[in-house]
Amino acid sequence: MKHNHEAYNLVFGISIYDIFGFTSSTYRSHDSNPGRVKVSFGGVCRNIAENMARVGGNTKFISILGNDEKGKSILEHAKSMNFDMSDSLVVEGASTPTYVAILDENGEMVSAIVDINIDHHMDAAFIDSKASVIEGAEYMFFGADNPECIEYIVKKYAGKTKFVLDPVSAAKAKNIKHLLPYFHTVKPNRHEAEVLCDCEIKTIEDVRRAGAYFMEVGVENVFISLDADGVYYCNQSEEGIIKPMDVKVVNVTGAGDAFIAGIGYAYLNHMPIAEAVQFAQTMSIVTISHEETIHPHLCHNYVKQQMNELTWDMIKF
């Protein structure tokens, strides 16, 4: 444990201002469609930070925003959710990363625009200006959205904190697989693990081989999501699969963000690895039980209550 005033986790990555337009009748292209518009705050890393803070994990989040109303609203929301974005880079005259999507009467996306032209401002000079924040963190969490920044950080600050990776997608995993030895923890799904390990994962024996590979390259804790088959976990002393039974699914969006946030909370509170998996999975289960990407009532007590009420299938190897 570091000897800072209060232990914290640091999340590093992009915030996105999401705008969704839903048509209320048959969608017509090249025309104005009646409907409703919903605004929310997204981005994998921003979601991780909010989830972690909601269950009581002391969380700092370094992101990049424009000095516009969208960026200001994201910062205000962070304050209300009790995670610290004060070390973020705010770029004068730039647009906060924004995603705009139009969905038809069936909820299918018919068009979208994404504006993330601001991300090139996140350079080595800015990162090094936050050296004390990075080095003071118990763990530092990344998505795989900016491989150049990730590579700079994990190499420059190796040994100063512990790095945790959510690969986000198989395509993005390919860009950071050479950095695996720098990570304390990786949390891929089955497809991302296949890319990172250069192997097919179809059976329990396959996933165990993938876990062994991660251990061989220097990763300390591995969590591989197997979707409905549960989560495989391993470190140098424990290995198993934990699966919750009879899970209700409304919307799977955000489940991975909630899981990695749960791992972050578990790390700050020194949970044994199997208990950490259960807590993190419960956060995912709470998330997918609601239409929102982050459950509006997510908090520590609610997660613990749900965790105790679930039935678990637990395999140890």
Image (cartoon, rainbow, N blue to C red):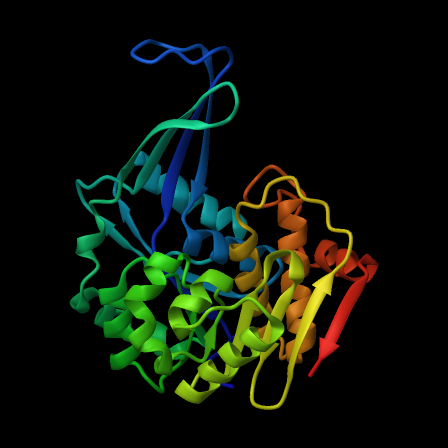
| Side of 241 where 234 appears, left or right | left
Q: Is 292 above or below relative to 9?
A: above
Q: Is 118 above or below relative to 300?
A: above
The percent coordinates of residue 302 (x first, y second) are 73, 54
User: Could one spot residue 229 in this view of the protein?
Assistant: yes
The answer to which of 252 and 4 lies nearer the viewer is 252
Identify the image quadrant of residue 236. bottom right
Number of on-image labels: 0
In the rendered view of the protein, which quadrant contains the C terminus? Answer: bottom right
The percent coordinates of residue 59 (x first, y second) are 49, 63
| Side of 139 where 120 appears, left or right | left
Q: Residue at x 20, y 45 (%)?
A: 117
Q: Residue at x 67, y 72 (%)?
A: 241
The percent coordinates of residue 190 (x first, y second) are 51, 63
Q: Is 282 above or below relative to 115?
A: below
User: Could one spot residue 132 in this view of the protein?
Assistant: no
The percent coordinates of residue 156 (x first, y second) are 25, 80
The answer to which of 80 and 120 lies nearer the viewer is 120
| Side of 71 where 81 appears, left or right | right
